[in-house]
Amino acid sequence: MSPNLFLLAAPRSGSTQLARWLTSHPDIAISPVKEPNYYASHEFPPAFVARHHLNDIDPHRYDPRHDRPAQFAVFRQADSYHALFAGLHTPWRMEASTSYLACPAAPARIARAHPGARLLSLTRDPVERALSHYRLALRTGRSRHSLLHELTAERTGHTPLPGRFLLRPSRQAEGLKRIAAQIPPARHLPLRFEDMVADPAATLTRIAAFLDIDPHGFDLRAEGRNAGARPRLPRLNRLLLTTGLKTWARRNLPATWKPALKRLFLDETTATPIPLHARAALRAALKGEDQALAALHRLLHHDNHGQAPPDPRAPAPRIKSAPPAPRVPP
């Protein structure tokens, strides 16, 4: 079996939550590694992946029949990648690598390898997305610097390509243009994080129509978020990352331990404060990106439906019982 549904989401745009909702439907299954990054693997040099302990599992040894599911790994071999879908027998078989939207080559590679596949794209306000990603980098220990330091390093080219998490993933309009150049409108559904948070049921109803599946099959009670909580012990957090102990723990400790460990190491009650001058610098670096993204969404939606995007304030059909609004990744 091969994937026939791809979620091309910007990092920190709610892809983990959306994937959880989608796979609550009996007609949709996801790769046991949510983000295998196969079609963007050339952007992840092996030395960088090893040095930063990016792989949650070993792609060369991973057996989806026996090994636990994982969030992220860089798969480079075709047979290992396709083995991820061998046990999926649903009408729609999905993967959700967040590297694809920013990767110039990924949409074309997907289109060539899977000519009948359908794509969901998911974007978020560029500045808010970048701020959320910065908080995540602090939480995981991948950054210990100020926002201004990280911003300067990216703008001057000192940050290696796979480590750029502020500007490149926030320039989402370019990613949508690449998708539009490769995928016909009937096979691409553009979505917005803000719409999804405002009314999850409406978003899932649109997806159900796009995939021709029962809109009542989703379970909105399914939760799956990748929050940017504040680390209680930043130096220990960084040490656990750089030594690979975090990766070892993800691979070996029981999943039932995760909530207790998160409470021990992370403060989910307060987000890392961002100075106003740093926010202003980030906003200046991304000037015009929000307007470009909004304009492209209007164009793509018109191509698909001949009308403007739906107003998120309008009432939408209900899917089962309405859940509490999902928490926004900080």
Image (cartoon, rainbow, N blue to C red):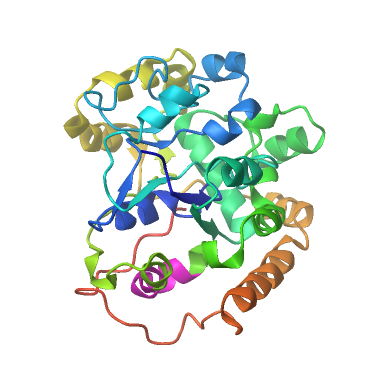
Identify the residue shown where x is 66% and y is 35%. 164
Picture quarter containing residue 291? bottom right
Number of on-image labels: 0
Residue 216 position by quadrant: bottom left
Return the residue nearer the eye: 185 or 32. 185
| Residue 121 visible from this viewpoint | yes
Q: Is residue 201 magenta?
A: yes
Residue 275 is left or right of residue 3, and the answer is right
Query: Which residue is depicted at the point 22% across and 56% down?
Result: 26
Q: Position of residue 111 (x, y in %)?
A: 59, 47
Tell me: residue 51, above or below residue 189: above
Q: Is residue 190 visible?
A: no
Horizontal relation, residue 231 to residue 310: left or right: left
| For residue 37, above or below residue 192 | above
Q: Position of residue 88 (x, y in %)?
A: 28, 41
- Indicate whether 154 appears above or below 280: above
* x then y, percent, for residue 163: 63, 30
Residue segment shown in magenta: 195-205
The residue positioned 25% from the left and 28% from the top of the image is: 68
* Quarter holding residue 82: top left
